[in-house]
Image: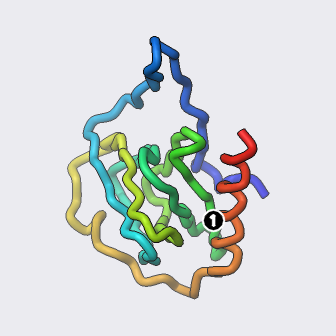
Amino acid sequence: MGLIQGVTLKKIESIQGGMAEFYTPQSSDETMIVKVPANSIDDLFVHKHQTDQLLVVKGSFVLVVLFDRQYQYIPLSEDIPQVATIPRGVLHGSINFSDQHCLLVNAVLRHGKSNPRDYQPVTRPFPYDINQAKLNWQNISKKAIAT
C-alpha cells in the first residue's frame, strides 16, 4: 500500500566531511524540536495552516495518518534518515513503543497565521490497530540493522 496522497517520505542526503556527516537541512518558515515520550500513544492532530516536515534525530516512533477512515502506520527512525512530509488538513498522530523518548525536528512550512487549535488533540474516531503499528515499527528496526 502506498502512502496517503500528499504524505511523502524522502531519504535525506548527506555529505561526508572527515569523520562528520552533514545532512541537507529542510527549508522552513519555523523549526521546532518535538519530543515523543517513551511508551506513548497520542491522539490525532490536524493543522489548517502548516505543512509538517518531520526528521527523527534520536530514537524512533510510528507516525499515524488517518485518511478515508483508514489509518496508515509509518515507522520513522534515526537509523534511516528520511523526512516525512504531512500537508495541512491531514489528521496525524504518533505512537512510541520504545522505552526511550524520540526527538525529531519539525521544519514547518506556514500557509497562514498559526492557530492554537492546530495543536489541540482530536479524539480518534476509532482505535488504532496497535498490533499492525508495532509490526511496522519492528520492521524498520530490522531494516536499519540490515543497512
- Circle 1 crowding by C-alpha within 10 Å: few under 14, some 14–19, many from 20: many
Q: Position of residue 125 (x, y in %)?
A: 52, 85
Q: Position of residue 76 (x, y in %)?
A: 56, 53
Left or right of 91, for residue 9: right
Q: Position of residue 119 (x, y in %)?
A: 28, 66
Of residue 130 and residue 144, the one placed in the foreground of this image is 144
Left or right of 69, for residue 103: left
Figure quadrant of the C terminus:
top right
Image point 52% across, 41% down: which residue? Answer: 83
Under circle 1, the secondary element is strand
Figure quadrant of the N terminus:
bottom right
Taking 26 as reference, is 125 above or below it?
Answer: below
Of residue 7 and residue 12, the one placed in the foreground of this image is 12
Amino acid tagged 1: Tyr
Of residue 37 and residue 113, the one placed in the foreground of this image is 37
Q: Quadrant of residue 70?
A: bottom right
Q: Which residue is mark 1?
A: 73
Image point 40% across, 28% down: which residue? Answer: 25
Left or right of 29, for residue 2: right
